[in-house]
Each structure stands twice: as C-alpha cells, then as structure tokens.
Image (cartoon, grey):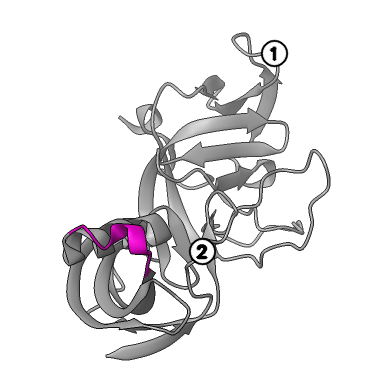
Amino acid sequence: MVTLIVCFLLDLNYEMPRTCSIVCQVEIATLDQREMFCLSEIEHTLRLPPHLLNLPLAEAIKGELEGLFLDKVIAKLGLCISLYDIRSIDGGFIFPGDGASTYTVRFRLLMFRPFLGEVISARLKESSSTGLRLSLGFFDDIYIPRALLPSPSHDEPDPEDKNQVRWIWEFNEQNYPIDGMDEIRFRVHSIQYPSLPLEQDDGSKPFAPMLITVRKPFNLDFSITDFMLGSLDADGLGPIAWWV
C-alpha cells in the first residue's frame, strides 16, 4: 500500500470547493499502473451541513462527496470520473458554535489516468496553425503541435470553418487530410499537472489542471516552451482511416 499526500485539488471549472480540504491523505490500495481507469482510496474529513441531516447518512455523504470530487483533478492521481463506493464513515462530531456534523469518510474514486506509452483514440476538437487539440469527450486537454504532425504536412483554410485550418499529410504523392471525420490515434508520453496561476491575462486560454502530452517516436531538432507537446509522426498514429 502506498500513501501519498495530495497537495492541491483543482476543479475543472477552476474554483475550489469551499468545504474541501486542500491537503488530504490518499491511500492507493491496488493500483495497476497499466490501466487507463483505476480506483483510488481516499480518506477525507467531511463537514455535513445541517440541512442534510434529515436524509439517510450514506445518501447525504454520497451527495456531498460527488459535489466535491466529481470532474475534479487530483494531482498525481488524475481526473475523477465517479464515486465508486464508500468504505467507512466514522465520527459525527458537532463542534461548538457549528451546527454541522463532521465525519471521517473513507471512499474509493474511479480515476482517469492513462499510462505512459498507451495508444488512445480521440476526436479532433480544434485545428489551428499551431497544431491540433484532441478530445475524449470528457477530457479535452490533449495537444499535438505542428512540429510533430506527420511529415511532411501542410495546412490550408478549412472550407467548413473559416476560424480553423485543415492539416494535410503528404505521402506517396497523395494527400491525407485530418478533417475530424475519423478518430485519431495518439500515444501518451506524460501527464502534466500545472500549478494554478495566481492571475491570467484577458483572452488567454482557460487554465487546464491536467494536460496529456504525446510520445515522440524519435528526437527532433526543435524546442517547445509549453506543455503542448505531442506527435502523430509514427506508423499507425493519426486518423484511423489512414491505416484501414
């Protein structure tokens, strides 16, 4: 059993839940490093508001935990998909001057955290002169920069969306477009958990608490200064229709 200390808990809507501890103890009991989805066991001190005390205890605690953790990113553990089960509920103390009861709850969360080297299929979300942004439907922060698209490639205006471009892979004197019609295979290189910025400039892209970057198959002579690093430049990667 491995014990971790999670130093920050971030909401995908970029707001911290008021009743959520910033530091909580996490125990991972059987964590398979080769699974995209895994169970993480967490112990959390939960304040249950007085207006929920008329509900069955397990139901009230389940609703509060879902509000605190669902669609949240926990550093080093991943994105919470669902509350799997509640293992134990202890306490129920009411502190002086506070009408709420406080419980120590041990529960398991179903987490999304791809393993390194995993090949995943995603959908095209955005295409610009800087590269591609992919989406799994429930997670959108997967980036492929232009330097690591299949080589040689070029972009041209998208006839269906004037605000985007369409990337074309040139191979054997034929053009293969990345047009969003098919799923796109990519290989996971690493997962980044950036620190929450103290402030953001107007017009900057929304903060992403979890970024998936993609494995590059060989060394390339270029530099990228942010976390948007990825590659489709390998056999079998890219739109599925290219390889069937």
Question: Which quarter of the picture shows residue 66?
Answer: bottom left
Is residue 36 visible in this depiction of the protein?
A: no
Of 74 and 24, nearer the camera is: 24
Q: Is residue 231 above or below residue 244?
A: below
The range drawn in magenta is 48-55
Give the quarter of the image for residue 99: bottom left
**Is residue 169 in view?**
yes
In the rendered structure, find residue 191 and report the number of the disc placed on it: 2
Q: Residues within 10 Å of mark 1 (few under 14, many from 20)?
A: few
Q: Secondary structure at mark 2?
A: strand
Q: CA distance from mark 1 to mark 2?
A: 32 Å
Q: Is residue 189 above or below residue 23?
A: above
Q: Quadrant of the N terminus?
A: bottom left
Q: Position of residue 234 (x, y in %)?
A: 48, 48
Res. 162 mark = 1
At 42% from the left edge and 52% from the top edge, which residue is drawn? 71
Query: Can you tell which quarter of the image residue 24 is in?
Result: bottom left
Q: Residues within 10 Å of mark 2 (few under 14, many from 20)?
A: some
Q: Is residue 156 left or right of residue 201?
A: left
Q: Is residue 40 above or below residue 95?
A: above
Q: What label sits on residue 58 in the rendered view?
A: none
- Up the image or down, 182 lies above or below 42; here it is above
Q: Position of residue 62 (x, y in %)?
A: 25, 61
Q: Which of pointers 1 and 2 lies earlier in the amino acid sequence?
A: 1
